[in-house]
Image: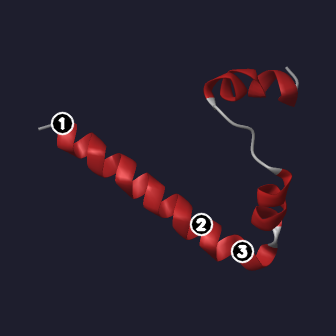
Amino acid sequence: MSNQQLLVPILKFLKYETSDEWIEKAANPENLQVILVDHLLCELNVNMCKLSFSD
């Protein structure tokens, strides 16, 4: 299966495509820490919500 085929369900789910400008900024090694912290915060929020539903 090609990468493009793997992306089909994700692209259908997302309302907007990621801009080339954002991809360029995210790919810049200087921004790696910001991207990782942002991802960490998203993961924490998801897990906090998950825990609140498990009560």
Residue 16 found in image quarter:
top right
Numbered disc 2: secondary structure: helix
Q: Position of residue 26 (x, y in %)?
A: 75, 63
Few, some or many residues within 10 Å of mark 2 (<14, 14–19, 20+): few
Please, which residue is most extreme toward the left here?
55
Give the residue at mark 1. Answer: 54
Mark 1 and mark 3: Cα distance apart in space: 35 Å
Q: Position of residue 10 (x, y in %)?
A: 67, 28
> Is 29 on the left or on the right of 12, as rendered?
right
Mark 2 and mark 3: Cα distance apart in space: 9 Å
Numbered disc 1: secondary structure: loop
> Is 20 on the left or on the right of 44, as rendered?
right
Give the residue at mark 2. Answer: 36
Residue 51 found in image quarter:
top left
Q: In the rendered structure, which amino acid carries the disc numbered 3?
A: Asn
Earlier along the polypeptide chain: callout 1 or callout 3?
3
Identified at 38% across, 57% down, the residue is: 44
Image quadrant in which the C terminus is located: top left
- Checking the image for residue 22, the label placed there is none
Q: Can you tell which of label 1 and label 3 is closer to the viewer?
A: 3
Q: In the rendered structure, which amino acid carries the disc numbered 1?
A: Ser
Earlier along the polypeptide chain: callout 2 or callout 1?
2
> Is 51 on the left or on the right of 12, as rendered?
left
Q: In the rendered structure, which amino acid carries the disc numbered 2?
A: Leu
Q: Position of residue 12 (x, y in %)?
A: 68, 22
Identified at 54% across, 64% down, the residue is: 38
Image quadrant in which the N terminus is located: top right
* Relative to 23, residue 4 above or below: above
Q: Pick the residue in front: 51 or 24.
A: 24
Identified at 63% across, 66% down, the residue is: 35
Few, some or many residues within 10 Å of mark 1 (<14, 14–19, 20+): few
* Relative to 25, residue 9 above or below: above
